[in-house]
Image: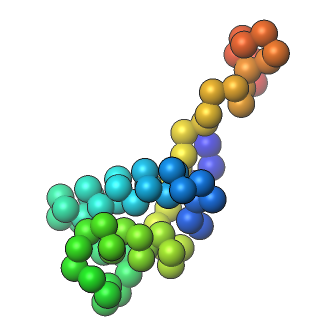
Amino acid sequence: MTVESQAPDSKFAFVVVAARRARQLMSGAMPLVSNPRSHKPTRVAVEELGAGVLEYELPQTPGEDEDKDGKRRKE
């Protein structure tokens, strides 16, 4: 898996990453952007994703490491 810093192309992945970051902010994490426009955790998370300062990893989708029979390939 690679570490990404740009916002995901998929809307679903964008929401998942933003939600996870919002939970971190609600638990007391400091915002990665200076002077966020909002104090709401979800808005700050979206702003961080848009600014490209948030690093994240997306899990591999099933099928990326499988052959045509559905068996995993050895690397």
Give how far across and how far down residue 25 sits, in percent: 25, 64
List x then y, in percent, for residue 21: 34, 59
Location of residue 45 by image quarter: bottom left
Above or below residue 39? Residue 18 is above
Q: Position of residue 62 (x, y in %)?
A: 63, 27
Q: How is colour applied across the structure in the image? A: rainbow
Q: Position of residue 66 (x, y in %)?
A: 73, 20
Q: Residue furthest right?
A: 68
User: Quick check: 6 left or right of 16?
Assistant: right
Report which quarter residue 37 is drawn in. bottom left
Is 22 rendered above or below residue 31?
Answer: above
**Left-right relation of 40 to 13:** left
Could you tell whether 56 is left or right of 69 in the image?
left
Q: Quadrant of residue 61?
A: top right
Q: Nearer the viewer, residue 56 or 37?
A: 37
Name which residue lies at 48% across and 69% down. 49
Q: Farthest front residue?
A: 11
Residue drawn at (51%, 75%) of the image? 50
Residue 30 visible in this rendered orientation of the protein = no
| Quadrant of the drawing holding the C terminus | top right
Residue at 40% x, 60% y is 18
Give above or below for 18 relative to 68: below
Q: What residue is drawn where x is 27% and y is 83%?
A: 38
Q: Closer to the camera, 30 or 6?
A: 6
Residue 19: in sight, yes or no? yes
Which quadrant of the rendered structure holds the N terminus?
top right
| Total residue callouts | 0
